[in-house]
Structure formats: C-alpha cells, structure tokens
Amino acid sequence: MLFNTISFALFLPLVFLLYWFVTNKSIKAQNILLLVSSYFFYACWDWRFLFLLVFSTLLDYFTGLKMEEAKNQTAKKFWFWLSISINLGFLGVFKYYDFFATSFAEALAQVGVNTSPITLNVILPVGISFYTFHGLSYVIDIYYSKIKAEKNFIDYSVFVSFFPLLVAGPIERATHLLPQIQRERVFDYNKAVDGLKQILWGLFKKVIIADQCAIYANLIFNNSDDYSGSTLFLGAVLFTFQIYGDFSGYSDIALGTARLFGIELLQNFSFPYFSRDIAEFWRRWHISLSTWFRDYLYIPLGGSKGGTWMKVRNTFIIFIVSGFWHGANWTFIAWGFLNAVYFLPLLLSNSNRNNLDIVAKGKNFPSLKEFGMMLTTFTLTVIAWIFFRAENITHALHYITEMTTNIFNYEFYSQSYKMLSKIGFQFLYLLFLFILIEWNGREGKYALENFGVKWYKPVRYSFYYGVILLLFLYGGKEQQFIYFQF
Amino acid sequence: MMKKFLKKLFLFALPLMVLSIPLDIMLSNYLKKSNNYNGEMEVMNDIYSGKASCDIAIMGSSRAWVHFNPEIIEKAVNQSVYNFGHDGHNFWLQYMRNLEYNKYNKAPKTIIQSVDVFTIQKRKNLYLYEQFLPYMLWNSNMAKYTSTYEGYDFFDYYIPLVRYCGEKEVLKEAYSYWKGTKNPNDKTRTKGYAGRDKKWNSDLKKATVKKEKYTISIDKPSEELLEKFIIECNKNNIKLILVYTPEYIDGQKFVKDRNKVIDVYKKLSKKYAVPFWDYSSDSISFNKDYFYNANHLNKTGSNLFTTKFAERFKKEITTK
C-alpha cells in the first residue's frame, strides 16, 4: 500500500478513528491496533515477507532480553553477535548476495578464470534495510548498556513495524520512539492539523514534483546517447529534484501520519539543497541514516578523534558503506565515494562544521557569497546523483563526459530548450513555486509549517484546495517511491 | 479537541465531496461528445441512449468495425443494421458491449459475430482505456469485464472523479468540448462503421521483421464466454452467424496455430448448429488492393466484401 493511493486514503482514517475512538481507553489496545494495522499495511505488498519481518522482530526482541539476562560478558557477546550476524545475514542474502557472486565471477574472469555464479534472483523484501537497521540500533544500544531491553513484545514490535516508517524510514532509535509508544498519547489538535499539512506537502512533493520530474529524467537517462550536453545536465537536475521530492515527500507523509497518532518521528530532511557545503548537505539529507552511521559506525571506528589519516579513512568508510546501503551496485558505491571526495577538503581544513545554522537565517535573501556556495554545492550534488541514477559506472561516466563536451556549440544548448518546451512551462512554474515555498519555510521543520498561517483564512484554505486540485491534475497511476527498493 | 478537529476536517472535505459527483457528471458528459478514441464513444452513446436498436447487430473487433458497411446490408435485406465492432478488443469486451446493448435497446433478430485469430486471445492492457471513462462509474458490467485488464482498479469504478485523476489529456479533451473548440457533430462512424480510404501499408513487413511467425495463445475464459454467448443466443431465439472476414493471404501464413483457432469456431458451429462463414479463402483475401494491412480491408475492400456477404445473407438467412 503506497502513501499516494486511494487505498491508503481510506486505510488511514479508518485506523485513526479506531485508534482515538475504540482503543483510546488503553495504551495496550492502541498499540495492538497499531501493530495489526502495520502488519496489514506491510502484507499489502507481499504477505510472505511478513514472516521475515516478524522473525526479525522476534530475533532482536529475544536477543535483547538474553543480553540483559546474560551472567557474563561472553554470553552477552554471544547473543549480540548472533543477532548482528543473522540481521546482516538476511540483508546479505536478500540484498547483496547476487551482487557479490557476480562481482566475484567478473573479477575471476579478469584473470582468465571463467565461472558461472549461482544467483538467487530473489525479490528484495520492501523496507528490509530500514527495519533491519531499527533492530540493529536496538541490539547495539543494549549491548553497550545505553538502554534496557524492552520486555513488552507488542511495544517492541510497534517500534520496529509502525506503519508510517516501516518501508522507508525515518530510521528510528529505541531511545526516541519506544518511550512514546509506552506512554499515554493524548490527542493534540495543533499537532494533528500540523500532521495533515505535512502530509499534504509530502504529497505535493511526491506526486507533482518527483513524479513529473521522473518522466523526463527517465526519458533523458534512458536515452542519454540521443541528447546533447545541456539536455543531459537538465536530466541530472530533474533527477536531483525527483529524488528529493520522492524521498523527502515520503518522509513528510510518514512524519505527518505519525503525528496524527500523537507520535513524533525523527526529522529526516531539512532543506538539503540550500546547503552551503557538502558537510551541511549531509547534515540535512536523510538525517536518520547519516546519524545512524555516525553513531554506529563512524564513532566506533574512532570518529575524528585520531589523526588525519584515521579521519580520512573513517570518512571514506562511512560514505562508501552509506552508498552501498542504498543498493548492490557499483554506482551507489561510486556515489558514496564521490561524496567522500567532496567532503575531504572540508575535513582537512577543519571547516566541516562551519555552516550549522540554516542559510540566511531571519533574512529573505542569501548574500551573494551564500548564493554562490549553495549553487556550487547543488551542482556537486547534481553530478553525484548521476552515479546514483545511472545503470552502471560506464553509463555514468559516459553521461558526464557527454554533458561536458562541446559546450561552445549551439547544438549543446538548442536541444535543451526543446526539452524544456516538452516538459511544459506550466510545470516549470510549479517547480519554481515549490523552490520558493521551500526557501520561505526553511527555518521550520517542513516548508508548509508556517506557510500562510497569518493569511486571511479563505486565502489559506484556497491555497490548500489549490494544492489538492494540482494533486488531482498531476496524480493518477501511482508511482513507487524510489527508496522502497533500498 | 478531537470534536473540533473532525468538524473542521469534515467542513474542509465537504465541498470536495459534494462537488465530486456533479463534476464527474459534467466531465463525463463533455467527454462523451468526443469523436476521438476511434469513435468508440459514438457507439457507446448510441447504446446508452437506445439509438442503437437494430434488427441485425454486427459484433466483433476492428475487423467488424471496418469490414461491414451496415448501409449495404440494410439495402439488401431491408432490415436495420448497426455495427458494434470494438477496436482492439477481443470477445471479452465485445460481450460486455452486447450486455450493455441489451440493457438499453431491443434485442436484435440476428447477430453477425465477426471472429478471427484474436477473438479468443486476450490482451493484458486495456487498449484505449479512455473510451470507458465516461460510462464506468457504478457500472457493474463495465467493472466486471474491464477490471480483468491492467488499467483500472476497484476505486475507479466506485468513487467519483478518482478515475479522472492525472488524466490531463482526457481533461483537455472534455474541456475542448465545453469550450466549444471541438464539434461533437464531427462523427467518425456511420451506424458504427468507418470505411478506411487507405492503401497497403508496411505493418505486415514490420511484423515479419520483428518475428518469423506470430503465435496465438488461446484464452480459455474468452473461449468459454464465446460458447456461453452462443448458448444464450440460441436460448433467446437470436439467429447467430459466426463470420471469419477476409484476411490477406500472407497475413494468414504469418500466424502460427491459425488453424487451431479456426477449429474452435468450427467445433462450436457444429456443436450448436450455428453457421460459420469463413472468407479466408475468398478471392478478396488474395488481392492486396483491398487491404491496408493484413487484417483490415480498406473501404473498397469492405464495400466489396459487405456486398458479397449481404447477397449470401439474403439468400441463406432471410429467405429461410
């Protein structure tokens, strides 16, 4: 069940009404309802993978308890590594096995040994990377005695499977979400209204921005040989907006939905395309994953405490692993590597924490310098996304080469004007409006948070109806969210 | 607080809910005027307004639509004729059209069912899906038969406006009739028929380049539905004739298992005592000048074929 479907538009109010009117007398009943709804939500994709989700939940729940009950460090370590290895084993089998098998065979072929690797060709269970990371953080936190093991199985299961975050995050932490699941939730009018606004904005990002950009980004990327440099650049820019609209749109809907149930999820995006350097970009893009890797990989590796070499090594590790987390393809690894390269000068000059606040805070416009920095960061990001979107490394390199050759030819530019006309200036206006609203709302949690709150009510409501009308015009046959495949 | 929230939410959603039905009706009514989508809506409009009532109903696919000229048959047998040929669809949706016809029109005395190699082969996608949009809301027959294709889902049939969501081209089409920039009287069909003034094209050549032979896969439910239809016709005293209209000889050779499909029609014809007239070996099928591709006669070919057919029909059916 996708967020941008009628099925979800019916499912959500039903669960909402049951939650606040039928099960509101007891937290236990509310949590059971959330769990059943979440399992139903997940089973709508493929009920067979529900067993995997339940198994993963049971595994981390029991190993968590066993670690806490362990009488000595050896026993604790045993249960810890059992959980880690099974969790990573699942990821390895479902997500990475075929990649490693074929890459190994290709490597052998390079030295003249021809083998035919046995591949599994299994379907990747939706959300496996997300719920596995939920479980991993929980088990690691118990092992390092940061949290106590959860005794209530229902509460723990809701933490892993809560439907708004189940398939594409945010990747929650037990310290943040579990206490909210355990305490009584009181309906908050303002939070619920805020939640609805965030859902509306998430749908706008997904249905209008991402899905429309996807049409032309796919066209250009899939037929890149037919296009000149400026069109290829346009394709990469469109993909840059597509992936942002798609994933941050999903996160907005997830956060808004959770808020309707009185639960606050971790913020996952904070206007990343207004970043002034790549370090700031990574503090604002897929925040729950970046912080996960920071806490469970970067810091245990030594973080930035060691010498320069260690810092560089750890930075490359975290970026490459982060790239690989997205999928079993060299393109994701290259994307991670390129981001590490971007990050390197900031790290070496100790200026990776220069831009902690949002750009032009309290002002309407950025300074010329800030604008230049944002544009540079955005351009670097666009180039990196080419690796993320390309079929393979050769495709990405060819794409970039073609994008940057013959820049002094008329042909280089004329074709992109035709493409812009094909896209339609109506949509380009919408894209521009979207950027303006995002810019205007960049100091909030999401762009629409404070947008129009001081307006005359009918005007504000007209704006909301306008967004709904646009959703009607641009909606239709729902598109998958990109991050579901990860 | 909850009461206030639900009240406000309801008030916000109310105009959307209230407007959705009249908007749906308005959109559908303008879209029905469209002569786009191969003129399929003209036929559907005639069916739903009862204007399609006829003595002889011609059913089938595009090979019925462009092959049978009703005016020639009308002149020959002095009975009213309507061509319900449904472009791009097999018997599954041809049967649905027949069901809809029976709801709003008098039963025909005779049905000429055009059959071919595609009649009992079902496609996956709902070809020209837009043609169903104005008629499908709360229409159980349409829901039953079109939902078996990739195209619409459950909510499209039961919630107003949902099926129009994202259909920008369709909305533009409806808007052009509302604005009056398009004329609903520019019909493309006459009693369902549209003769094609076309010359032989490269469709067959392209197809043979793609693959050596085309293989037919018989869809069992479609075959069973055809049998059910024959039984119903017999039960309701409707004279049914199965007709395999001319097909260019090189096209016939291109289809593997063609005889297997024809055997199905022969078997049904024998089992239920229904005539099966096969024009595959008629002289028309050997003359490229009468076709614009291997499966479709041009206007000259269709007039010649309909004249031949009408003579035989008059002799063998109406005089009996």
Image (cartoon, rainbow, N blue to C red):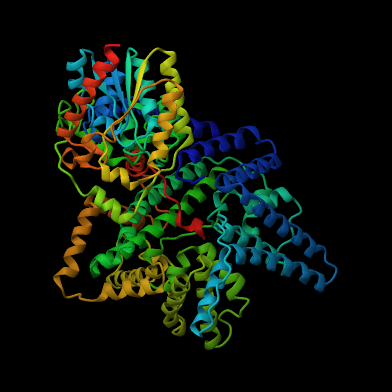
- What is the number of callouts on the image? 0
Residue placed at 43% from the left, 80% from the top?
A: A341
Q: In the displayed structure, does residue B4 sit left or right of residue B205?
A: right
Is residue B9 shown to the viewer in this render? no
Question: Vertical placement of B309 versus B211: above or below?
Answer: above
Where is residue A111 drawn, in percent x and y?
51, 85
Instruction: Where is residue B111? Give x, y as percent.
Output: 33, 20
Report the quarter where the C terminus of chain B lies.
Answer: top left
Residue B24's spot in the image, x, y percent? 33, 28
Q: B107 or A321, which is in the foreground?
A: B107
**Residue A90 image-quadrant placement:** bottom right
Q: Quadrant of the N terminus of chain B?
A: top right
- Observer able to see residue A482: yes
Farthest residue toward the right? A71
Which x, y percent locates residue B204? 26, 48
Q: Quick check: A375 above or below B235?
A: below
Q: Residue at x 23, y 13 (%)?
A: B79
Q: Nearer the viewer, residue A475 or A357?
A: A475
Q: Is residue A433 left or right of residue A359?
A: left
Quadrant of residue A432 within the rendered picture: bottom left
Q: Nearer the viewer, residue B78 or A116?
A: B78
Write the residue at 55% across / 76% down: A115
- Nearer to me, B91 or A153: B91
Q: Quadrant of residue A185?
A: top right
